[in-house]
Amino acid sequence: MGASRSSGTTDELGPDEDSGGGPPGCSGDPGPPADDAGIPGEPPGSELLAALLDGMDAALCAFDAAGTVTHWNREAERVLGWTAREAVGRTGFAGWAVRRADADEVRARLMSAMDAPGRQVHEFALLRKDGGRVLVRTQSAGVRGADGQPAGVYCAFSEVHAQIDLERAIALSEALLEDASWGVVLVDVDLRPTVVNAYAARALGGGRTALLGRPLGELVVQGVEELEAALHHVLAEGAPSAPAELWVTLRTAEGERRRCWRSGFLRLASPLTEEPVPLGVGWLFRDVTAGKLAEQEADRLRFRTSQLHRAARTASECEDPMEAATSLLDFALAGFADHVLVDLVAGERLVRTAATPFDAPGPCLLVSGGAIPARYGPGHPALRSVERTGTVRTSAGAGDAAQVWAAERRWPRDAAHALCAVLRSRGRTLGVLTFLRAANRSAFERPDAAYAETVAARVAGAVDLAQVTAGT
């Protein structure tokens, strides 16, 4: 945006006394240029006034009480093409900046602001110096003299499309920060939130003002390192080309929540400087946890279905039914558990018949030398599964308690989560199948129990066949 030239402006509304009603040719060609030394009698502050007008972001002109142009800044020159020397001293816009047919109406509407309170907004079609027309939006207001009487009018104007673009930008920013259906967070260069919209406040579990200025580490328990790394990258290198999906764990009043946010980032720079000065980062995100969990569940289901299919084909080639049972379990373990134990009913006891190694990953193998009694104490999950003829899920506490918990239940020391599924065939309970996970994995959930029961049904069929074959 531009401003007026000091040689073409005065610091008071109204032309010098010798300017009369305007320079010769005020209705056509511009009059003689003003002296480069400035208008005689200007006070020492005229250069400051001109500099201030030069720095304005809007086109500005001013009229004295008679309608003579007294001020014209460089942005007005940019918009209309008329220089300050050509504009200052003219009477109104007639014949040069507006069509003669429209001149009286434009003059009346502009000068009416001199006696009206506040500002008036109008839209006019003005003429450029090259003859083209430009639609401008004006804001005009009256100016009072030292005696309090109307002394003139000042008028700030801009091209309508530029004003509309500005209004759209403001409206967009307000909508994003108020009603957007995704989260918007503005963070400063220290990565502290400065603006948070309603969606983001709900997602982060706090009020819009309560979250301002707080480190992200106070809001995000896990995943804050990845989030801050993304923000630092944007500040240093610019916005990434595609959205990123970030998994975070939030601290809320109801406990910790794990969420997935599909995030986009924008580097914010000041438009008021020649060199881009970073103001921070605009972070836009949507909570896609439900969709991601559904995708993961679908992938898991496809994988498990494929494993069961492969297990069935492999088991069908085994001559020994117990070998078929252990083959089924090898396929079932992949991605599902770390250990598996097979305990079969022998009278009033359970005996260990097959298991994976306790000290390292490995295949499920029959116990060498024959089955041995499982020394389970009262209330053991495997015994409860047999008693209920159903599935039992259980987990240990954190830390050293997990090792004690596993040792008391005669399980591998790294076990922290267990799922016991009963083996049933032809209406009889044959034993129990125990899947175990280490502490670095999540606990068994209901979908896991359904899968374990499917595996147990197939293993029970193989075990039943092995018992019938051995009996014959």
Image (cartoon, helix red, strand yellow):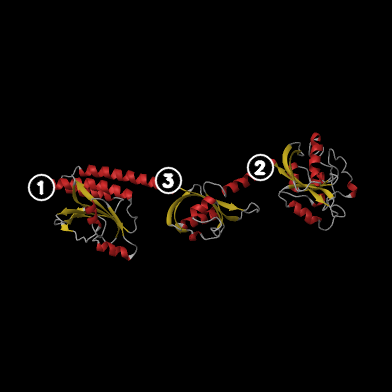
| Residue that mark 1 sits on | 471
Describe the element under mark 3 as helix, strand or loop: helix
Q: In this rendering, would 262 be left or right of 9?
A: left
The amino acid on which the numbered mark 1 sits, given as a three-letter code, is: Gly
Q: Nearer the viewer, residue 323 or 168?
A: 168
Residue at 72% x, 39% y: name it: 135
Q: In this rendering, would 224 be left or right of 268?
A: left
x and y percentages locating residue 67 in the rendered image: 84, 44
x and y percentages locating residue 13 in the rendered image: 83, 50
The amino acid on which the numbered mark 2 sits, given as a three-letter code, is: Ile
| Residue that mark 3 sits on | 291
| Residue that mark 2 sits on | 164
Relative to residue 45, is residue 287 depicted above or below?
Answer: above
Q: Nearer the viewer, residue 172 or 161?
A: 172
Describe the element under mark 1 as helix, strand or loop: helix
The amino acid on which the numbered mark 3 sits, given as a three-letter code, is: Gly
Residue 348 visible in the current orientation? yes
